[in-house]
Image: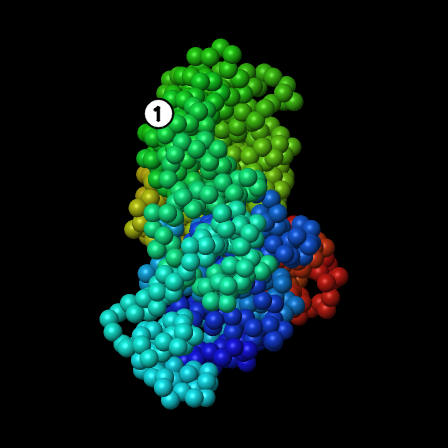
Amino acid sequence: MVKARLFGRDQELAQWHQLADAVAGGNNAELTISGPSGIGKTSLLDALCADAAERGWKVMRASGDARRQLPGAMLWQWFAPLAQRLPAGSPPFDGQGEMLHRFITSTDVPAERDALSYSASWVLRSRSEARPIVAAVDDAQWLDELSLAALLDIGSLLIDVPVLLVRGVRTGPGAEHPEGLDTAGLLGVGEGAGMTQESLSGVPLHWRLEPLTSSAIETWIVERQADAARINAERVQAASGGVPFFVEELLERDLAAAQPGASGNEETVLRERLHRLSEEECAVLSAVVVLGKETTMARVKALAKPHTSRVPAILERLHGERFLASARPRPAIQHALVGEALLAELAEKVPALYRRAAAVLMAEDADPAIIAGYLLKTEPDGDEEGARVLLAAACQARRQGAFALAAQFSERALAESVLPEALRRDLFVEAAHAHAGIGQLDVAEQHGLNALDLTTGTAERVQLLLEGAVVLYDVNEVERASHYFGQALKEVEADPAADPDLRRRVIALASGAGFQQMQVAERYAEEIAAILAQDPSEDGPGDRLLLAQEALRLGITGENAALSGELGVRAYGNGKVLEENGPESNIINFVTGSLNAGERDAEALELLDAAIAQARADSSVMAHATLAYCRGAIHLNRGRLRLAQVDLEASLRAAESGWKTYVEVAAFLLASVYLARDDVASADALLPRIPLEQERVPLVQAMALQLHGTVKAGHGDHAAALEHFTAAMDLAVGLGPTLSPWTRSAIESAARLGQREYAAAVAEEAVERVRAFGAPRLTGVTLRVAALAQPPEAAVAMLHETIELLETHEGRYDHALALADLAELCLLGEDPAFLAARRQEGLAAARKSLVLSNRIGAAAVAHRMGVLLAGQEAQLPLVAENKADRLTAAEYRVCSLAAKGMTNRQIAAELFITIKAVEWHLSRAYPKLEISSRKQLASVMDARD
């Protein structure tokens, strides 16, 4: 199988055959090879990769480096050769893969851990369509922050694709991460021993390599030389500790007769060899060790002075003595143990060596991130040039998501005693951003204050104050955030020359964070009035932010639906708000919320579709989840149950990756969809994901109660449901009708329990508030439940108004419900005269409800009306089966996109799934839809549904 003989690893090699067969069969797998330095991890990894290459697999290699922390270095090593050949937008760097291409080819691209992981997994999935892939990384314990996170994430994103992730991980002394990162997750996988071939696919395996036995060493000795009489394998095992690196050292030096003694004999072997090096040999070897992966002949000569002319010959000699694995064209150390032993011997001379190496690289104008790695290992000496390099490297690292590394770089630069004031200020700012990124808020705040002390201009000071306030507010440090919002407002107010757009931005952010002191409230109203008085073409970013804030406030408080929608449209600015803020910004949610409240569905969906497309291009899973929730809510309002289910399920799936922003309300909405579609079991399954016992802020807890109450009501347990709804009402006092679903639910449950007096009282107030708000569709939804608490004639009149409003303003699910309620009222009442007069109206309403609910997939209403009509011995309407209801939610979404003409790759990118999954969904959907080709999809998929 392999070119080089591996001794004592027969079990691992045997299992490799089974694992390779499983991956070749289309299964994903993860393998960790761990053990102390010198145990043979790299040799075993080399053997597996060599065999994979012989099998025709694509082999991708990378390695961590304790002395070279470059953000995303593993991804660069894996994908850069391909990215340099292919343009962005072409497979596999299309769809979600485009973000990875931008990251690799430009240092200015901001990176988020989840986004980068998803983008990399897309590229791996795409490439594995042609042939299996082994993506290997050695010395994974030394990966940079971003690469480590990606490596831990990617495995869970590669399901049922022929990709094998292999990671070599050092354990024991010397395995510490240079940034102090926790690398325990690399070893948190199961053991490989004893597993069957069937259990290998998709299961993380772990081979913990043990020292070689004397039997394995004896086999090695015999195969190495025929005359092995004088070599004692047991002594070799004792002297080497069974570590293959030291076994080979002993055999190469004919020291196999070494007596077993105290622990540490193996290190002694290497140390004694280093002591025998001449001064010039030590200088050259030190240069190679310190330069590491940046080693070139020219750089070695620069560091090895005054022995420059003899460097080539010395390198060849060191190669022959097995200190170097290669001498040309790029000298490389034989083993990490050689370098570590040498650095330990040099002790106090090491910082000076790294300082000289940094100077050599600076003279060549090398990448700041590379130079910074060397500067970290030096002592501060007032080096301004080095501090500027560290600042540039810190900025780059932070943009690429490596916050811990950025903090290290900026702190090291700040340790320089004498720096220009402007440079020190910039370093404080960068350090504040970096420490905030890793959650060290107290440290970040202090650095921010230090930067503020060195800042003079109003715009610059206000920007710093706002950045600090927003960071604190985002982690619920409201009081501390309010202090900085207030200070920012004071400073901008005190400067008559301050930019008006900046002032409006301060007021918008401060009011949005709940900082409603009188000064803010007064200025808020004044600025809104000034914006409304100006021509919309003059609106700037701060204006749009304040408009969005006011639009959302109107929607939340229930003051003016039409104005909320109008301001939302103006804040949208034909897409400018997305261009200025990006899909991850809360401003997009604000604008969408106001458009939703104002029932401006077209503009809301236009904004959301564009934002989702951008989030997809950025592989931003969290932004995609939030935006999909927002779009799902609008689809549900309009009665597009199938599309709502797809979007809301996508959001809930992201919750497994850490999405928490709107998970409670998304779960409630999804439960509503499931119950509408008569899928009670799926609604039940949501409850354990949102336990009521969890501590939450009041509004979020109200949403959790709403979810549980909705499911209880779906089971017909209106008594328990009403308890949940009234508890939610107590937690969310003062909200407008758009954010009060519990009020409408409480009316319905109370009415169905026979508590008509309570239901009528709550309904009267709810109807008054929603009419004052002026949202037509929401008025119809509220009138429907209010009718349940009215006397028959009043209820009929209310339902007639409901039906007209919902038909005119596209609320098709609630329209079907209103028709069903009207049918039951006219056919199941207790007054014979009323029933006789209303029978034909009731039958017509039941038939209309049945047809409409069948069309939109509201199976629960359709079943309810079918039973009602059968009980009345009435003729059922001719209802053609909606074949789309045969599809699962995932199949429906895939087919609806394919019906629009999207390719499989485009659909996969849109839905954050694999191309293989798209093909699978389509192949399962065609027989259900009774079609045979993609061209027929448009005839069976109604875009309105």
**Residue at point 25% right, 74% down?**
261
Relative to 911, is 193 on the left or the right? left
Residue found 48% across the figure and 63% down from its top: 318
Q: Does residue 405 appear left or right of residue 593 in this picture?
A: left
* Image coords of residue 317 (percent x, y): 50, 63
Give the SS element for disc 1: helix
Q: How is the image coloured?
A: rainbow
Eyeballing the image, is 626 above or below 603?
below
Q: Position of residue 809 (x, y in %)?
A: 60, 39
Q: Residue at the location (44% across, 24% down)?
A: 420
User: Which residue type does callout 1 highlight?
Assistant: His
Of residues 53 and 500, which is closer to you in this image? 53
Q: Is residue 668 visible?
A: no
Which of 485/349 is in front? Answer: 349
Image quarter where the N terminus lies is bottom right
Q: Position of residue 347 (x, y in %)?
A: 34, 51
> Is 869 situated above or below 452?
below
Within-10-Å neighbours for mark 1: few <14, some 14–19, many 20+: some
Picture quadrant of residue 275: bottom left
The residue labelled by disc 1 is 483
Residue 426 in picture, x, y percent from top left = 45, 29
Q: Residue at x 72, y 63 (%)?
A: 934
The residue lying toward the viewer, choosing from 157 and 820, is 157
Farthest residue toward the right? 935
